[in-house]
Amino acid sequence: MLGQMPQFIATCATGLEYILVDELTSLGVKNAKEGLSLVHFEADWKDVYRTLMWSRIASRIYYPIATFDAEDDEALYNHCSIIDWTQHISPDSTFLVHSQSFRSTMSHTKFISQRVKDAIVDYFKDSEQSRPDVDFDEPDVVIHCKIRRNKVTLSVDLAGTGLHRRGYREIGGGAPIKENLASALLVRAGWGKAQSTNLFDPMCGSGTFLIEAAMAMLDIAPGLNRRYLGLYGWKQFDSELWNEIQRDASERKQTGLKKTELNISGSDVNPRAIRNAQLNIAQAGLDDFIKISIAGIDQLAQKHFPENGLLIVNPPYSERLGERQQVLELYSELGSVIKRQFCGWQASVLSPDKDFGHALGIRAKKIYKFNNGSIPCELLNFDLIEKNFLERESEDKVDIDFKSKLSEQAIQLCNRLEKNQARLKKYLNKENVKCYRVYDADLPEYNVAIDVYQNYLHIQEYKPPKTVDLKIAGRRLKEVERVASGLFQLPRNQIFIKQRQQQKGNWQYTGQNSKSSDTTKFLTIAEGGRKFLINLSDYLDTGLFLDHRKTREKIAQLAKGKSLLNLFCYTASVSVYAATAGAIKTTNVDLSRTYLDWGKRNFIENGVNPEKHQFIKANCVEWLKSETQTYDLIFLDPPTFSNSKSMTEHFDIQADHTALIELCVKRLKQGGVLFFSNNFKKFKMQVEATDELAVKEITKQTLTPDFQRNPLHRLWMINRLDN
């Protein structure tokens, strides 16, 4: 239609579509309509250039140049080859094609990009012109190909790269929040709407929130320092119009820098993060407006803050297996600090998990959902006034009436746990066993293992199938905790949960006022008359393999007056059994210095001087090849698979066990015994008995009642026969 405005597409993170509509409208565009992670709009070219300069929230700006249907690569190529590419790309310039595909017969995005690239190059060849080259770093023109249900939209990417790149970030942290997401969350937090010009971030990382907040208040365009845009190399680029937009932005910046009332500050416990933030702030030219310092959240009581302002924070929420409890405690401590130090302020806290938000102990006035990359998150907004401060359920109390609060499924879990406990009672009392497995994924809905360690519980979630919604899995895990706490009458601060999830960032706050701190991370438990140090919070395993209880006893029965070689020794629990049973010497080999030191401490706990035994940090396979000593007993319990950086080659138990056992047999005295164990469920033993060796599987003899339903190991006894 004559006079119709050009159509454009702006993309953004999921959950930010509505505020992007508001921002684009404020920049002068027309008919902005939100879609999924994008906004369609109309605009004249001056408003589009203004959007590229001033949008703080958009990720990309696309200018569609063609739409058509294509079910295969031939149709895609044919349609692309008839477009007049000389309107967009100069023969002597460079270009790149990016592709996306959703529910279409063509799904391989690299192949789609290749076919579009071929069509463009062939168009220039057929026109007897020199062909433009492909550039993967900073191409003059970026073409975007999006296919949804076989409908193709070809666009010029006017940004060329993510608009979150402002040009000030020299160095980020482990996983810094993107600049445009930080800016959008500041809008959601109400920054700039209230009278206060005070802002504080207590875990500022590389300073992104601080810089974006300052730029917004000082009227500094996010695109002013951008060195590269896909717009610059586009054939239809209007440099005069762009220079006009730049001049206006520069003038507004100079006016904004005259403001003096701004008070933006941040702190972080990590000195490296503070150094990175200082570099980024300097690069942005905002040293006079942003102040940062090294401080943990427990040190904020030493600082003075104004009566009001906005506190915004993105706590590190590394979701490695085993760190969930630490993250919960960090959010809990953060909530305590906020309530104590910032009463009268507004606060906005990012959270990837409802439980983390609940741990703050503050009633939220508004919750916004968004995606931080691929991670669904919430922004929790708070009015920090006393009536919104919640009394949290005490971590050191037990809910006696827990059964009345259980769902129907949770009642089934409770019944199964009671049944298992009753079944094990006689065995536990007879053998005086205080550490055991009481549940191992008996019910498919509750896919966890629950281990009792005297007065503590260790709950480990197995990775849920992709078909199970993560929110449902999270709710079930919480039910497991409630049932276990109530049934065993243990407070929740004596329950440790290890959850398998994604990981974000590098964990900076481990050990800060949590159960994993140096003074409390190790617990002493008893087994078989011995003592062992365990750690229920920091590692995948606890330091003691409960399923090998009988294995340790069996080796101890043979150990008096003997020498023991313990390979892949972990925390040397087998050696403790042997040494306390009268072994004259144990040699413990492992690649981990942490576990070897742990093993020495286990020896000391049992009154055995570790200096009289050997602890060797080495690759067990390589060490065996050079070892010359022989031993009466060898315990070999290798991992199923290992590709440690300290190993020159990867190790696979099925492929490599024969050679490994042969190396061990060479180090075995005549009449000696090798115990070979592994936990690979599909393992097939390939070492057979000979005139020199007796090979017998003794797995059943080493299974205890708490592991008979779901055995974790298989064990062979290999005797080197006397000639």
Image (cartoon, rainbow, N blue to C red):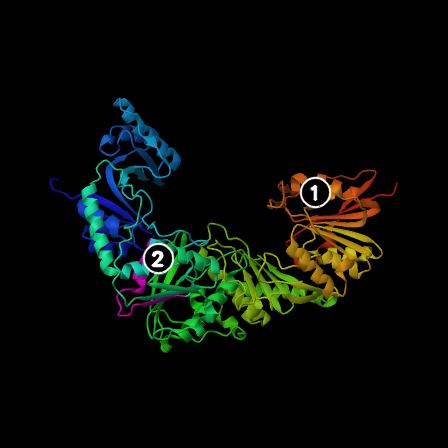
User: Residue 491 at x, y = what percent?
Assistant: 56, 72
In the picture provided, is 391 more to the left or to the right than 443?
Answer: left
Q: Is residue 496 visible?
A: yes
Q: Quadrant of residue 135?
A: top left
Q: Is residue 583 above or below residue 389?
A: above
Q: Amino acid at mark 2?
A: Ala
Q: Residues within 10 Å of mark 1 (few under 14, many from 20)?
A: few
Quote the CA–CA distance across marks 2 and 1.
Answer: 50 Å
Pick the residue in front: 601 or 542: 601
Q: Quadrant of residue 347?
A: bottom left
The C terminus sits in image quarter: top right
Earlier-in-chain disc, 2 versus 1: 2
User: Residue 224 at x, y = what percent?
Assistant: 27, 50
User: Residue 578 at x, y = what percent?
Assistant: 78, 58
The N terminus sits in image quarter: top left
Residue, far bottom: 386
Q: Amino acid at mark 1?
A: Glu
In the picture provided, is 26 more to the left or to the right than 436?
Answer: left
Pick the residue in front: 26 or 30: 26
Q: Is residue 250 above or below residue 351?
A: above
Pick the residue in front: 657 or 579: 579
Q: Which residues are magenta?
A: 180-201
Q: Which residue is mark 2?
A: 182
In the picture provided, is 666 more to the left or to the right than 52?
Answer: right
Pick the residue in front: 549 or 588: 588
Q: Is disc 2 placed on a helix, strand or loop?
A: helix
Residue 59 counted in the magenta span: no
Q: Which mark is residue 622?
A: 1
Q: Is disc 1 placed on a helix, strand or loop?
A: helix
Q: Is residue 608 above or below residue 373?
A: below
Residue shown at 38% from the left, 52% from the top: 169
Q: Residues within 10 Å of mark 2 (few under 14, many from 20)?
A: many
